[in-house]
Amino acid sequence: MPEGPILDFERPIRELEKKISGMKDFSIGESIELSGEIALLERKLERLREEVYSNLNRWQMVQLSRHPKRPYTLDYIRLMTTGFIELHGDRRFADDPAMVGGLAWLDDQPVMIVGQQKGRDTKEKVRRNFGMAHPEGYRKALRLFRLAEKFDVPIVILIDTPGAFPGIGAEERGQAEAIAYNIREMFGLRVPIVIVIIGEGASGGALGIGVGDVVMMLQFSWYSVISPEGCAAILWRDAAKAPEAAEALRPTASDLMALKIVDKVIPEPSGGAHSDPEGAAAAVRAEIQGALADLKALPVDRLLERRLAKYRVIGEFDE
């Protein structure tokens, strides 16, 4: 069972897990045979997990995407790849720890893997700026994308950010320009680009590294023009209305799949990615490998045509 903070809707599951764990310890310590009772409770636990996680509302899915134990970009890199060599700096201003990337092996395929990185403890959260990149982070990402293009290496992007950093320094150094420039340049990169939204995909902070040939989302991730809290603050001047905003925004993986904004939803392990990071990473790796195999078979000109066409027709809306 995962340790650490839990969400409100997870409490009945955690309580039952603790009960099962206690019965196992008691059975061993007192040499009492309780395997039948334990098996019964384990079956009940599986049913409860299925019931809870298959009936989450949109706001609960947003909360799950932010779970403090959820695997981040560097966790996926560690679990999916070998030989990762992190590359630093934008060659203009500084290195941005909120944006990480470098060369790695995905089985026998070299890839350039890039993504936002949040922090686990307070010190790392501050150093990583909570996964909110500055302009130099987006410029570093583009530098790595161009390096991948130079050496004909596919690009894998893992998105997990509450947004680009909106501070004065970031604006002074051209935050909006850096994001817009990345979007334009990524359409012309002559190598396959596979994107997976692994947690939060908020606004331009996500789009700054979000142009690709295949865009996938983990089951309990979200992707939207604004966070539910930001939307609620603008529309109702009350961030407490975030659950209402989440319903209106329709930011979940199933919503965006229905709107044809993303190409595939990757199922998460029972209980979410934080309950089984290895299982989540294995599922993501398999989907990336499959997507790259298909994309590598395309001539480069056809690849670029498809990428542009994908974004020209993206999305649906009601009238």
Image: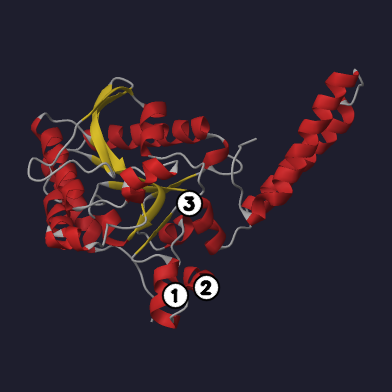
Q: Amino acid at mark 2?
A: Ala
Above or below, 9 against 97 in this view is below
Question: For the point 53% across and 69% down, which residue is it?
Answer: 243
Number of residues whose C-alpha sits closer than 10 Å to that of mark 1, classed few (under 14), some (14–19) or many (20 or more): many
Number of residues whose C-alpha sits closer than 10 Å to that of mark 3, classed few (under 14), some (14–19) or many (20 or more): some
Q: Amino acid at mark 3?
A: Arg
Which residue is disc 3 drawn over? 66
Left or right of residue 208, residue 4 in this image? right
Residue 237's quadrant in the figure? bottom left
Q: Residue furthest front?
A: 123
Distance (Cα) linking label 2 and label 1: 7 Å
Which residue is disc 2 drawn over? 240
Residue 287's quadrant in the figure? top left
Left or right of residue 224, residue 18 in this image? right
The x, y position of residue 151, in whole percent, is: 11, 29
- What's the mark number on residue 232? 1
